[in-house]
Image (spheres, helix red, strand yellow):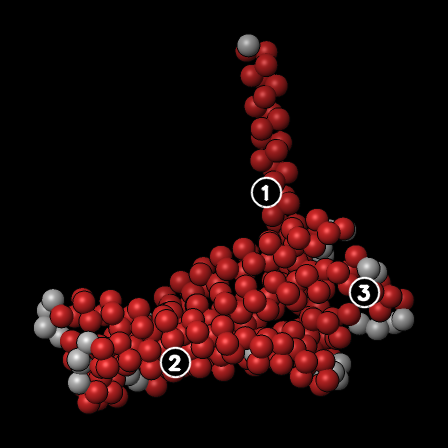
Amino acid sequence: MPHDSHHYIPTAVARLGARALGIVRTMGRMGLFLARTLGTLFSTPLKVGWLVKRIQFIGYQSLLVIILTGLFTGMVLGYQGYTTLSRVGSTAFLGPMVAFSLLRELGPVISALMVTARAGSAITAEIGIMRIDEEIDALHLMGLSPHRYLIVPVLLGAIICMPLLTSLFNIVGIGGGYLVGVKMLGVGPGAYWGEMVDYVRMQDILISVYKSLSFGGLIAWVCCYQGYYTGYGAEGVSKSTTRAVVVSSVLILVCDYFLTSVLF
């Protein structure tokens, strides 16, 4: 028994060390991938046609899910906010509470998670299939930059679309809170909008914009990286797509915490 334990401890340490080295290697490769993408962005002409297609895919095709998610998020906030504020006799502040919750946190975060689930996963799968079909290798052989044609349009498209989608989410969410709070629960419309105008500042709107810009770049970076370095076969694409959604979602929440601590 002691003899086996002596062999087990070095093996466990070796596995732990290999796992740590793998994480560090992945982080370094992701950093180089981002640096190469940014270098391509600022050193070569932009492919406008590819960018328009990415904006249409990431932005326009995400409108329905953003509108529905924003509407019901605002309605839930209206219900929960009214229940909480009614206990202290402050239902007149329902408007600012809904606006603050959406602008500072829920709007950017939920919008980013929805875009990751809908567009990010599809982009990862698309680039991954191009990798296993050797289309990316063909671009290299022709002397063309895959980053210019595939990665840069996604990065710019996500950065352009995310603030617009988040703003739409916030507007629809505030409208949803109005429907529940004013039309269903009896809060005065003047109080709902008037208190919101009094308490919501431009800084709150800018926080939403800054977060959405950061999340857009993060989604494009992680999803494109996972697709670009996908494993071969259907299983490799499946794992890359799952990993892209999970990693992007976790990093969005982590990034949200640090941005909140800096911007507040």
Looking at marks 3 and 1 on the same chain, the residue that comes earlier in the sequence is marked by 1
Name the residue beneath numbered marker 2. 172
Q: Quadrant of residue 58?
A: bottom right
Looking at marks 1 and 2 on the same chain, the residue that comes earlier in the sequence is marked by 1
Q: Is residue 95 above or below residue 37?
A: below
Judged from this view, the residue extending furthest toward the front is 184
Residue 68 x %, y %: 44, 74
Quadrant location of the N terminus?
top right
Task: Give me the residue at 44% from left, 81% from top.
Answer: 168
Question: Circle 1 — which element?
Answer: helix
Q: CA distance from mark 1 to mark 2?
A: 44 Å
Please state which amino acid type lies under the numbered disc 2.
Val
Name the residue beneath numbered marker 3. 136
Q: Is residue 20 above or below residue 110?
A: above
* Camera-side residue of 161 and 61: 61
**Can I make out residue 70 in this image?**
yes
Judged left or right of residue 198, residue 23 is right
Of badges 2 and 3, the one in the foreground is 2
Q: CA distance from mark 2 to mark 3?
A: 40 Å
Quadrant location of the C terminus?
bottom left
Question: Circle 2 — which element?
Answer: helix
Task: Give me the residue at 73% from left, 52% from top.
Answer: 234
Q: Is residue 24 above or below residue 258?
A: above
Task: Give me the residue at 60% from left, 25% from top.
Answer: 10
Of badges 3 and 1, the one in the foreground is 3
Judged from this view, the residue extending furthest toward the left is 89
Crowd class of label 1 (few under 14; some 14 to 19; many from 20; radius 10 Å) = few
Name the residue beneath numbered marker 1. 20
Question: Circle 3 — which element?
Answer: helix
**Can I make out residue 100 in this image?**
no
Residue 238 x %, y %: 66, 53
Q: CA distance from mark 3 to mark 1?
A: 30 Å
